[in-house]
Amino acid sequence: MLLTDLRTIFERDPAARNWLEVLFCYPGLQALVFHRLAHWLYKIGIPFIPRFISHLSRFFTGIEIHPGALIGQGVFIDHGMGVVIGETAIVGDYALIYQGVTLGGTGKESGKRHPTLGSHVVVGAGAKVLGNIQIGDRVRIGAGSVVLRDVPSNTTVVGIPGRVTRQNNLNSNVLDHDKVRDVEAEVIRALFERVKSLEKQFEQLEDQSSLSSTEVGDELTDNPKSKSDGMIEDFLDGAGI
């Protein structure tokens, strides 16, 4: 598994220069080495020592993995500071996890209470995947997303709460953050366009009413709609929508 983890790092990280640098300067790999030892001791029923190894690993790497978590081969924790993986979490083969990710629970329930990630899953920086949920194979989770429900395979999930924004996400192991949709901003844009359309229809009806053209002009002049429209446009433009 160590050799597989090393090969995965060289395949996915262009900054990896040589074996020595990866072994001594990649906290994600070091945390996995600590975890595999702690997990083996945990499975055979050794008390205290597995948790203590996990604690030492967190101190040296900034990555906290409970000894009970099941981590597949070829998993790459990139940078890794602030990553937390709970006791009953399962991470599939060749998953890619960025810094600040939490695979956690949602309460005090017992039993399986942490997420299960399929193979070739990518979890963006700062994302939170919470509860006993199933994340399918080749799923991409956008940075900062909060995922609380099951996610089917070959999809991309973004937002709070996480929503599926793309289907048939095949042959993609890297999360292109600049290409992830902002679904919430898109919905706001759609609602804004609908409101503008309704306002236009209302103005047309108003022109056909018994009001004089002077009265209509006075009302439009006093209406702060143009200023608010500009504020909304600035907000949506800032989101790239």
Image (cartoon, rainbow, N blue to C red):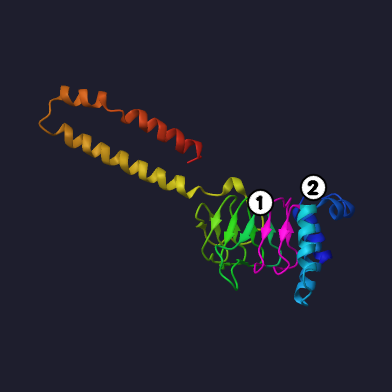
- Apparent side of residue 177 relative to residue 237 in the rendered image (left or right): right
Q: Can residue 45 be seen at all in this image of the molecule?
A: yes
- Apparent side of residue 95 relative to residue 114 in the rendered image (left or right): right
- Apparent side of residue 227 relative to residue 22 in the rendered image (left or right): left
Q: Residue furthest bottom?
A: 44
Q: Which quadrant holds residue 220?
A: top left
Q: Residue furthest right?
A: 20
Q: Which quadrant holds residue 77?
A: bottom right
> Which x, y percent locates residue 120?
67, 63
The amino acid type, in three-letter code, at marker 1 is: Gly
Secondary structure of the residue carrying tag 1 is loop
Mark 2 lies on residue = 15
Q: Nearer the viewer, residue 6 or 108?
A: 108
Q: Earlier in the sequence, mark 1 or mark 2?
A: 2
The amino acid type, in three-letter code, at marker 2 is: Ala
Q: What stretch of residues is rendered in magenta?
A: 62-91
Q: Quadrant of the N terminus?
A: bottom right
Q: Name which residue lies at 64% across and 58% down.
A: 122
Residue 64 drawn in magenta: yes
